[in-house]
Amino acid sequence: MGLLLAEHDTVVEKGIDIIAHDGVTLALIIRDSFSKEGVNFFTPREYSQQLAHMEHAAGTKISAHVHNVMAREVKLTQEVLLIKRGRVRVDLYGSNLHYVTSRTLGPGDVILLSAGGHGFEILEDAAFIEVKQGPYMGDQDKVRFEPRV
């Protein structure tokens, strides 16, 4: 399943939220409650960050494999956060830096931040894991801004 572009929030399946604005997908949230057998990719092939949910029964074997060396061009950093504990509010902004919407994430929730801007408020002591493309260039990698309403 690839991400759908929409003018508004879209729920594709129970436990999956796509947040879009002006035809651009800003974020994809996979709630801890999401469950589906097999390998299910949520991102289109052209995304530089791929995200999938995998669910297999005990005894399933996944063939040993190695990934080929392939040159890839990353034009936009896309981040994935996995909330381990606590609650975190994410504020999402369109490409024009105007506020679009907020969502609260809890333990087990995963969010892919695919476009636009974002900011966070820690609502409860939290721990989360961030995955993004590297190498990370520190402050050269981002522009901080004052949100517009």
Image: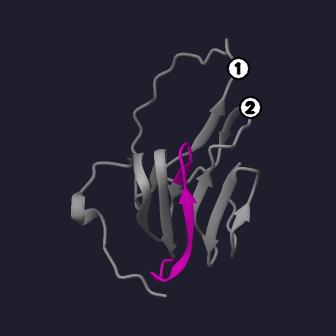
Asked if 38 appears above or below 60 in the picture, the reply is: below
Please provide percent x and percent y for residue 21: 61, 75
Is mark 1 in CB contact (under 8 Å) with mark 2?
yes
Q: Position of residue 34 (x, y in %)?
A: 69, 43
From the image, tell me which residue sits under label 2. 37
Q: How many marks?
A: 2
The amino acid type found where label 2 is placed reads: Glu
Q: Is residue 116 above or below residue 130?
A: below
Badge 2 element: loop
Marks 1 and 2, the one that precedes in the sequence: 2
Give, as a three-letter code, the residue at label 1. Ala
Specify few, some or many for label 2: CA neighbours under 10 Å numbering under 14, 14-19, or 20 or more: few
Q: Secondary structure at mark 1?
A: loop
- The magenta region covers 94-111
Residue nearer the viewer, 145 or 64: 145
Q: Quadrant of residue 41?
A: top right
Residue at point 23%, 64% (across, down) = 139
Residue of label 1:
57
**Residue at image x 69%, y 61%?**
4
In the foreground, 91 or 48: 91
Residue drawn at the location 39% of the way across and 33% of the way down: 69
Image mark for residue 121: none
